[in-house]
Amino acid sequence: MESRLDAVIDKAIGENLIVGTVVMVMKDGKPAYQRIAGFADREAGRKMTEDTIFRLASVTKPLVAATTLAMIERGILGFDRNITEWLPHFRPRLLDGYTPEITIRHLLTHTAGFGYPTAAPDDPYVDAGISGGLEDQGMSMEENLKRIAEVPLFFAPGTGWRYGVSLDILGEIVGRAHGGTLGDAVAHYVTGPLGMVDTAFSVTDRARLAAAYADSDHGAVLMDDPHQLKTGPGAGMVFSPSRIFRPEAFQSGGAGMAGTAGDFMRFLETIRTGGGPILKADTVEAALANQVGEMRDADEPGAGFGYLSGIVVDPERTGIPYSVGTARWGGVYGHNWFMDRKAGISAFDFTNTAVEGCIGAFPKDITRAVYG
């Protein structure tokens, strides 16, 4: 495994596909591989280190989802409770004007009917000025919720799957139900008990934060602020790397946290081994089961979705030798992770390069190298 992973990392850095990375693999609870390579800040000559802090983007989602599950265990929230219990004025409608019931379960599984702003022509989320949690518009969560509610749902809740702002909405509910902020709740139920001391919705030690880079026709380039990046045909997003320094920016449950590789591995291994001390074993079993049937198949063949992340349903259709039931996801700032309980593996690449480190060749090659 070591030589395969080294070759993948050396090639990606040598070709300027990524600027820096921390790659970690645990097998049966023991370190199987760790490599720290490249630069955290190329322009400053600052090398990547084990305690480098990364903007997590969607790696935030499983942390917020786990917080939600912990609160459900305690009866503070409930899978099938209407979100208007906590957001009484948030009542999105369908195209026909009907206001459907949206539940916590819908938000956790991305089956509520919400989307994300993209660069597609006539995107209603872009037209409405909705934030996906990456850009910094100086907007409050209350204003963002108001704008989200003004856009018709893409489908009736529970009838489809679409990746979107559900975890931002859920994060606001979690904070209110906890009686504080979303960050307070995540610290109370997840990061605090696990000793994830460097994972939060703000960064106090700027000297450890990785600079943000983006794909270009000439390899990885330092992001502007804001930075618009095309991520595919008719798709793209706007990044504001400085958002993490603004404590007044709303705490995005879908994309707003920062943290270290070691912190996140602690979380993955906790979930892989049954959830203690943050979740009960039966909660983890449900979280790592496909909860959406075949609704996600058009988005990613062979994949479903649980309460924390994507779930591999048919490994052959993914093109990677995962075990059935493997949990996997990423973060658009440049991260990809997977947890294969049957093989006893927790693994990820954290990079500072969007979107190559998340959905480019690099994470796929890393994953294949882990499996051999």
Image: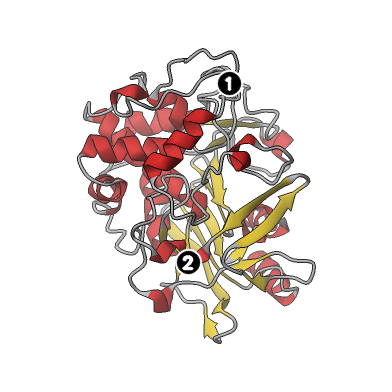
Sequence-first disc among 1 and 2: 2
Callout in the foreground (1, 2): 2
User: Can residue 228 be seen by looking at this rendering?
Assistant: yes
Q: Which mark is residue 242?
A: 2
Q: Residue at x 53, y 82 (%)?
A: 47
Specify the quadrant of the image occupied by residue 16.
bottom right
Q: Tell me the CA gap for discs 1 and 2.
A: 38 Å
* The furthest residue to the bottom: 45
Q: Residue at x 46, y 45 (%)?
A: 254
Q: Element under label 1?
A: loop
Q: Element under label 2?
A: helix
Considering only vertical position in the picture, is 265 above or below 217?
A: above
Q: Nearer the viewer, residue 177 or 286?
A: 177
| Amino acid type, mark 2 | Ser
Disc 2 residue crowd, few under 14, some 14–19, many 20+, Cα 10 Å: some
Q: Is residue 343 left or right of residue 9?
A: left
Disc 1 residue crowd, few under 14, some 14–19, many 20+, Cα 10 Å: some
Residue 169 location, x and y as percent? 41, 36
Residue 14 location, x and y as percent? 72, 76
Q: Residue at x 43, y 16 (%)?
A: 101
Considering only vertical position in the picture, is 65 above or below 193?
A: above
Specify the quadrant of the image occupied by residue 350.
bottom right
Residue 237 location, x and y as percent? 63, 51
Q: Residue at x 59, y 84 (%)?
A: 43
Q: Nearer the viewer, residue 184 or 322?
A: 184
